[in-house]
Image (cartoon, grey):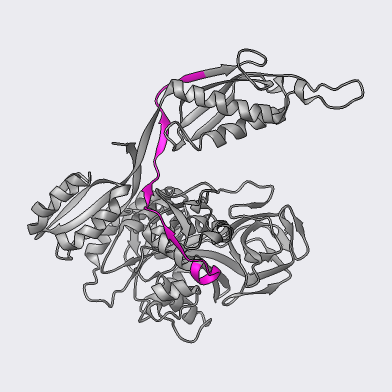
Amino acid sequence: MARTLNLGILAHVDAGKTSLTERLLQLGSVIDEVGRVDHGNTQTDSMALERQRGITIKSAVVSFVIDDVTVNLIDTPGHPDFIAEVERSLSVLDGAVLVISAVEGVQAQTRVLMRALQRLKIPTLIFVNKIDRMGARHDSLLTEIAERLTPAIVPVDSDPTDLLATLDDSVLTAYVDGSLTADHLRESFVAQTKQARTYPVFFGSAITAAGVPELMAGLVEFLPSAQGDAQGPGSGLVFKVERGERGEKIAYVRMFSGTIHVRDRLPFGKVTAISVFDRGPAVPSASVAAGQIGKLWGLTEIRIGDQIGEQHLRTEHHFSPPTLETVVVPANPAERGAMYLAMSQLAEQDPLINLRQDGVISLYGEVQKEVIQATLLNEYGIAVSFEETTTICIERPAGVGTALEIIDEGENPYLATVGLRVEPGTGITFQLAVELGSMPSAFFNAVEESVHRTLKHGLHGWEVTDITVTMTHSGYWARQSHAHGTFDKSMSSTAGDFRSLTALVLVNALKQAGTVVYEPMHSYRLEIPGDTLSVVQPVLVRLRAFPLSSTPRNASYLLEGDIPAAKVHELERLLPSLTRGEGVFECAFDHYSVSC
């Protein structure tokens, strides 16, 4: 019986992820020649901008076959500015390959990706690429991987007994009584990998193909196939949305259960066409079934993250949110409306852009800003510039606050009673301390909607989070009408009354509690020549990037600490001149800290 494996290829930028994808497609007989990222002729980097810059910007799906297994391979961006593309892909994977350069080793993005894979328990193989390059490492790199990613690694050509004996009681027992066989050991190794408890390591080179056939065999042996009943209830997840040549919306969906057919009616529209991935790009199909990834046309109302069917699928965030924002400004003021429409379409493909009416967008970094600028010019003919990039801070409640407005009392202009209490919490939680039947559900829904909308802008202008909002009082006037049956709005509560009053009450409760502004902080590792330490340290202090540790390493120093997200770009700009171009800097979002 044919099997399907939905596989993600993940890596820090320039580790060779897209080159590995090309080699897998060539060995899988999908392409005759391997494309080169630097030549702009790879299968998955189809955007003109991707070919120009030599980086992956959008996740792409392509398919090949190993024995009886159809592999739907999702090539994801490696640059941290496009981590949102990776996040959307994680929710649809059966397994993953994490690519690490044998020269550069474990980098900032590598650690971020590995933490997400472990958190989601996605079975993962590690492929150490570029073993043909000058400076490639083996033993020292394995030590680095064990220390910085996970100790549960085993090179596939090594004896896994020691590790498996700590994870599998049957291996330990068989080892002690002398009955452990090679087959028993291999079965345990495979089983533990499929449970994301062990991580086989392969060494090779995507450019020369060394070690890639062994990796392909490992995909089939160590990673689990897609599960799901094609005859069961429909259940799928939309992880990518793009626009076709005619501007039509195309949704990429991973089906976990059931089958979708052409002409099926879904809450987002009627399916007018379907294609599924088969030995290369997607091909037209009458349906897409459990385990498959398909492209759906006709769903005009669908968005990234939408679920098809009734089953709840895991869609929580796996990475940190954007920490920067800027304002997009059209070169021609008359094109503001067209620019906003174009940006709205880009936000469909990347919701974390979080486009606002005033042209403000959220960003992960400066490269993302350049890509947006080039896309607007190349695809929409709209030239834009950006205001200065600023940091996105958050607010958290400093204490407990309460506020109450009673219907028809004091200066309350609305036909509603709303009492709220705010206090520190985790995330944003809305709960009731009043009877659910004390007023119509539409009014409770209006209160909750208003709470979430109001928290978008706290006392200092930033989103309020890590807060629990409790509704302590409620009241309304029932629907009133005149003798001839017409509705009397002046004597009847409406959902609008509750939305408007909730915003006022919540702000008053926040004022009583007070809020504190927190700024995003990145953890960093900085390796510099030893003789530049005295020059670099004062700059780190000025940028509030105080080292928490300083470790001498032969002729260099390894500095580790925290740096405000707002200062990362400046440090990256200054570092080459401070360290003769020899400084190696990596960082990733870590936490929020009270703003100075």
The spot of residue 44 in percent (x, y) is 49, 73
The spot of residue 15 in percent (x, y) is 34, 68
Q: Which picture quadrant has residue 211?
A: bottom left
The spot of residue 448 in percent (x, y) is 61, 31
Disc tally is 0
Task: Specify start and end residues of the magenta stretch as a single range.
Answer: 377-402
Q: Which picture quadrant has residue 334?
A: bottom right
Write the residue at 42% across / 31% down.
396
Query: Looking at this view, is 480 or 164 the one in front?
Result: 480
Apparent side of residue 555 relative to residue 443 in the rendered image (left or right): left
**Outermost right residue:** 484
Q: Looking at the picture, does residue 36 appear above or below residue 333?
A: below
Q: Looking at the picture, does residue 43 appear above or below residue 200?
A: below
The spot of residue 163 in percent (x, y) is 33, 54
Is any atom of residue 4 visible in this view? yes
Write the residue at 32% across / 36% down.
595
